[in-house]
Amino acid sequence: MKKIKGIIKNHNLSTIKNRKRVGVIILFLTMLIFLLFTIRLSYILITGKVAGISLSEKTKELYEVHETLEARRGSILDKDGNVLVEDSSAFSLYAILDENYTDLEGNKLYVQEKDWPTIAEIFEKYVKIEKELTLKQLKPSVNKEGKQVTTVEFGTNGKNLNFETKRTIEEELKKKKISGIYFREEKKRAYQVGNFASYFIGYTNQDDKGNEQGVMGIEEAYNDKLSGQNGSRSYEKNSAFGDVKPGSAKEKKRVDGSDIYTTLDSNLQFYLEELLNDAVQKYQPEHITATLMEAKTGNILATSQRPSFELDTRKGLEDPNTARWSNILVEDVYEPGSTMKSMMVASAIEENKFSENEQFLSGNIKIDDTQINDWNNGVGEGNMTFRQGLAWSSNVGMVTLQERMPDLWQEYLKKFGFGQSTNFGLTGEATGEIQNKTTVDRAMTSYGQGISVTHLQMLQAYTAIANGGEMLKPNMISKVVSSNGKETIIQPEVVGTPISSETAGKVLEYMKDVTIDPKYGMGKEYAMDGINVSAKTGTAEFFENGIYQKQEYLHSVVTITPTEDPKYIFYMTLKKPLLQGVTANDIISEVSNNLVKRAMVARD
């Protein structure tokens, strides 16, 4: 013990001394902490940042409000201003099941179990939601994480409801004092009902950010003009009172999308869809394309295809195995057959290689080691004039003309726009191809085989014949109107003059023979009382599975009405119809004649 006391004494380790030392250490540490705190606080006050994060920005996040001013997507209209597509409001049903969802007075704002059967009856009555689905959705459940589900929806039938349906349901719920059912407002793209130039109009889907994006047709091709630009609004709330802080409001105005006016005539378009529906039901073709165009402008008044889909419901696109995702009129190529013969005759007339009264022997002709036959298995119709050869659709007559101008004919094919895009404006437009490597290839193009074309290219080429030699670009847009009212009018565009006015007039006259010549006319079905019609029919073998199909054909016709002063060009193709007691001309003329007559009456 003496030794221990000696050690404490020698080291001055008394209790009092220790307390003093501890006190000094604590005081020093307190001063150090205070100094560090002062330095830290000074840094924050000077820089306004904590851990690299701006305090002012954090404050703004708490009290600043940001809103997106969503731009209205432009409408799509017909030539007379009738709306075909527009933005509208739609509503979706949802229910809140969370029993904590009450107001300040304690009133229940959630769905109560006693109301389940009544809600199910209301939903079934007004939006055709099955009672079993409603009751299942309203029953308490947990999600994958094991948490209570507090909000539920009611399937497809509970979405895209119009304002009238919403109002009716709300009134029913209010009358029966039912709480917990609400509506979420959503922007909806409202389309013309049923089939209506569906592949030309197109439709939209939402991208990952919720923005509407065009998928096909005008919706896709003119997406930038239709979309517009979203605006924004921001302001700071007064932290004490929650009102807007004076001078803090900032706004960037939205720019609504432009409205697109098409060249479509709604009355004619509806009628064409009706005529095509009848044709499909009766004759079940693999596909149909049909277009009515103004001869003097190139404006398309009505156009459609089958298969198609309904714009409003998209019925026809729901099954990926049977849906047709391409616009046949723009994206598909095919060998046109005898409708190409009008261009062969026009080119020969232009180059003085054609005399309407000169005769040739029909039946068959040999090119190199290949025999080319007329359509009646090479039997022919004996001697006939070249004018009669066009009406009778002689392959031999056309090949004979082509042999007189082999290189020039290739140039005329290009002048008429084949093998190149029409730049129509829709995405995916095909260009086609001209087979010209061999003498036989070049000969076959004179009667529409060995050359692939699009529906639009054929229409464009025939405008030169209908419009005094001037070839017009097919057009589907009449004007674009921006949100500030500025109009951009789309004028007819001449894209070439492959033949003279005199030549065009002669070809029109020769094409009239197709409908009126009692012996050689192969398209008498297209004649109309009181109106002269110029026409050219076509029956083409199509190349499939590596060979030309000999038993089934692509049938087509071009009509130009009236012959003396063309107003309308109609072009239709019909692939593999069931010909039971009728001809392809019977089927096509039922569409063409009725549609053209209605257009003529409406014009008068």
Image: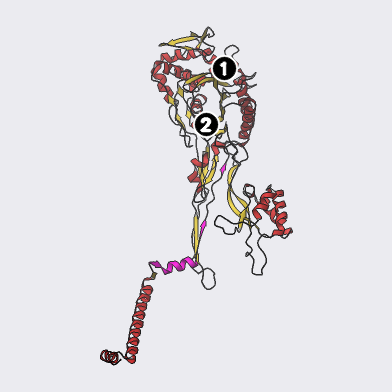
Q: Secondary structure at mark 2?
A: helix
Could you tell me residue 414's position as x and y percent? 42, 25
Residue 465 among magenta residues = no
Label annotation for residue 328: 2
- Looking at the image, which is closer to me, 118 or 492? 118
Can see residue 505? no
Q: Residue at x 54, y 70 (%)?
A: 242
- Whichever of callouts 1 and 2 sits on the residue coming sooner in the sequence is 2
Can see residue 205? yes
**Quarter of the rendering occupied by the N terminus:** bottom left
Could you tell me residue 373's position as x and y percent? 49, 12
Identify the residue under disc 1. Answer: 514
* Badge 2: residue crowd in 10 Å (few <14, some 14–19, many ≥20): many
Q: Residue at x 57, y 37 (%)?
A: 319
Image vertical order of residue 491 relative to residue 374, above or below: below
* Badge 1: residue crowd in 10 Å (few <14, some 14–19, many ≥20): many
What is the magenta range?
A: 52-78
Looking at the rendering, which quadrant does residue 111 occupy?
Answer: bottom right
Looking at the rendering, which quadrant does residue 204 occupy?
Answer: top right
Label 1 to label 2: alpha-carbon separation:
27 Å
Say how many tags the image has: 2
Please indicate whether residue 107 sits to the left or right of residue 376 in the image: right
**Residue farthest along the right direction in this orientation:** 175
Image vertical order of residue 353 relative to residue 496, above or below: above
- Looking at the image, which is closer to me, 482 or 542? 542
Q: Amino acid at mark 2?
A: Ile
Image vertical order of residue 310 relative to residue 247, above or below: above
Q: Amino acid at mark 1?
A: Val
